[in-house]
Structure formats: C-alpha cells, structure tokens
C-alpha cells in the first residue's frame, strides 16, 4: 500500500504542479479564458490513462500461466525504465521547469485560430506523460501485491497530490519540493531495484531464464516474508527471503550504478566527473 501511495503522490504532485503552474501563468497574464482548454487537456489525459490501465489489466488476466509470467516480467522492466527516467529527468529539469512550461504555453497560444487545440494538446501531453508512467508502475505493483491495499494506497496518494496541488495554487501551503523530490527519488531507486529483481524471477518462471538459479542466501529463519516486517519489505522493496543468485546480481547491477549517478551533483556527467580529478 505504501509504495503505490508514494508513487502516486509523487507522480500526482508532478502533474498537479504542472497544471497549477500553467493555471497561475494564465491567470497572471490575464488569459483566464483558456482555463477550459487547459482542463480539457487534463480530462482527456486522465481518461486515456485510466482506459489504458483498465484495458491492460482486464485482458492480461486471461493469459496462460507462462505468458502471464512473461507479461509480468516485461511490465516490471518497463516500470524500472520509467521510474529511473522519472528520477533523473526531474533531477535535471526541476530548476527550470516553470520557465519551460511558460514558454510552451506562449507557443501554444500564439498559433492563431488553433490556439485552443494547441493548448489542449500541450496540457494533454504533459499530464499524459505522468499518467502513463503511473499506469505501468501500478500494473507492476498490483501484480506483486494483490488485494485491496495497493489500489487504496494509489487512490489515497493521488487524492493527497490533488489536494496539495490545489493548496499550492491557492498559496495555502509551501513545500520544500527540492527535498521532497530528492528523498522520494532515492527511495524510488530502491523500489526499482526490487522490480528489476522481480523481473528476472518472472522471466525464470516463464521459462526464459534458467541460469544462476541456486539460492544466494536464506533469511527465512531471520526475516521471513510471512512476518510483519518481511511482508512490509516484500511489498515495499521486493524483498525475498531466499532469492536466487541471478536476482541478487540484477538487484546489485541496477542499484549500485543508479545510486552512484544519483549521488553526483546535478548536471555532472561521469566523463566530466573524471576530468575534474
């Protein structure tokens, strides 16, 4: 429940910030007549993401077992890629996202008779990007943790994000967004590492990967997944009490480089970092 809540809080807050920045700019530049076009773009993006998520969730349940495992592995891989891109994209653009959005609004509204449709498209693409990221992550999360808790956590996270976005727009609350995105990004890297390990496990169960399947370690007597702590770690970070060597290897192969890149100052590339030594 916690991971879907956090992801939807973060993704929802990103989308809410985009909408609130656009709305504030329209209001500040006395172009409030375009609010309808802005909300139309939001509505179409939300409807598309919801429909896509529902369609994928409903159609994949009829797959045979091996195809189901293959699909779960592919979704986990897509979720890892999206989460990683999300973390480093936000880290890169967080300093000038406001100026970029304002330029995009100006460009959309300078298209003459098609200004309304251009603004709808701009807002749609901005919000749909966040929504599609959420769809693939939630599909991976719901496959790993069944029941009502993950959807409930996702709904609570999204509702909290919408409320925060409204309060930010009205000026009723100020968040340290830099710290928020920094610490949630760090946590998401560990979540993505767990999903990567889960993907290789799903590929093994689908019959595509049968290498290095010996047990790396067995913590079942120390931290069982049937215990409260083990269940929480399994749901949050993809913890397994007796993982295979390949699962541990994939976890480390993803986590170590991702953390090293994340710990570098923003805007510093590995080549630049070497040249300064």
Image (cartoon, rainbow, N blue to C red):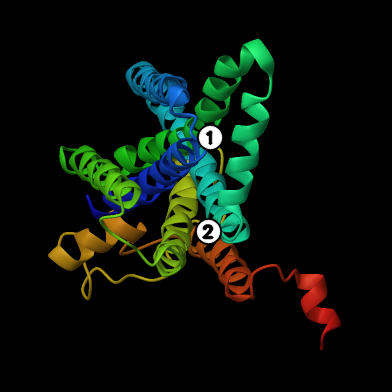
Residue drawn at x 53%, y 43% as measured from the top left: 77
| Relative to 251, residue 154 above or below | above
Judging by the rendered image, the residue that carries numbered circle 2 is: 246
Q: Is residue 143 left or right of residue 193?
A: left
Q: Residue at x 41, y 58 (%)?
A: 191
Query: Where is the C terminus found, in terms of image quarters?
Result: bottom right
Residue 60, above or below 215:
above
Lower position in the chain sequence, tag 1 or tag 2: 1
What residue is rendered at 23% in x and 39% in y? 155
Q: Comparing marks 1 and 2, which lies closer to the viewer?
A: 1
Quarter residue 43 falls in: top left
Instruction: Kindly tell me whether residue 85 is visible in this rendering.
Output: no
Are there few (<14), some (14-19), or many (20+) residues within 10 Å of tag 1?
some
Q: Residue at x 64, y 33 (%)?
A: 106
Tag count: 2
Image quadrant assignment for residue 275:
bottom right
| 243 is higher (above) or lower (below) than 101 | below
Going by the picture, which residue comes out furthest to the front? 30
- Real-space Cα separation, disc 1 to disc 2, in angstroms: 37 Å
Specify whether residue 6 is in view. yes
Residue 207 vs residue 150, the one in the foreground: 150
CB within 8 Å, label 1 to label 2:
no
Q: Position of residue 26 (x, y in %)?
A: 48, 35
- Residue 61 appears at what percent x and percent y? 33, 21
Asked whether, in this view, residue 87 is left or right of residue 36, the answer is right
Q: Who is closer to the viewer here, 90 or 188?
A: 90
**Mark identifier at residue 126:** 1
Check disc 2 and report its element: helix, strand or loop: helix
Q: Are there few (<14), some (14-19), or many (20+) residues within 10 Å of tag 2?
A: many
Pinpoint residue 27: horizontal percent, then vertical percent.
44, 37
Q: Which residue is at the far right?
A: 275
């Amino acid at each position: 429940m916690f991971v879907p809540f956090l992801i939807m809080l973060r993704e929802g807050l990103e989308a809410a910030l985009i909408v609130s920045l656009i709305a504030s700019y329209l209001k500040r530049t006395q172009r409030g007549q375009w609010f309808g076009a802005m909300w139309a773009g939001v509505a179409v993006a939300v409807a598309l993401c919801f429909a896509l998520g529902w369609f994928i969730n409903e159609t994949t349940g009829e797959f045979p077992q091996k195809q189901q495992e293959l699909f779960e592995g592919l979704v986990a891989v897509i979720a890892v890629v999206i989460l990683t891109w999300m973390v480093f994209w936000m880290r890169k653009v967080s300093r000038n996202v406001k100026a970029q959005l304002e330029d995009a609004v100006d460009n959309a509204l300078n298209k003459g008779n098609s200004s309304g449709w251009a603004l709808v498209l701009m807002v749609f693409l901005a919000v749909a990007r966040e929504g599609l990221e959420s769809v693939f992550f939630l599909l991976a999360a719901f496959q790993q943790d069944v029941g009502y808790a993950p959807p409930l956590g996702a709904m609570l996270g999204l509702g909290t994000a919408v409320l925060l976005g409204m309060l930010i727009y009205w000026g009723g609350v100020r968040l340290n967004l830099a710290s928020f995105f920094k610490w949630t990004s760090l946590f998401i890297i560990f979540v993505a590492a767990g999903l990567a390990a889960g993907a290789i496990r799903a590929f093994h169960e689908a019959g595509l990967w049968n290498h290095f399947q010996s047990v790396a370690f067995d913590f079942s007597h120390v931290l069982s997944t049937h215990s409260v702590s083990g269940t929480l770690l399994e749901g949050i970070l993809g913890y397994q009490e007796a993982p295979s060597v390949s699962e541990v290897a994939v976890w480390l192969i993803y986590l170590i480089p991702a953390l090293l890149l994340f710990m570098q100052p923003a805007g510093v590339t590995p080549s630049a970092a070497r040249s300064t030594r």
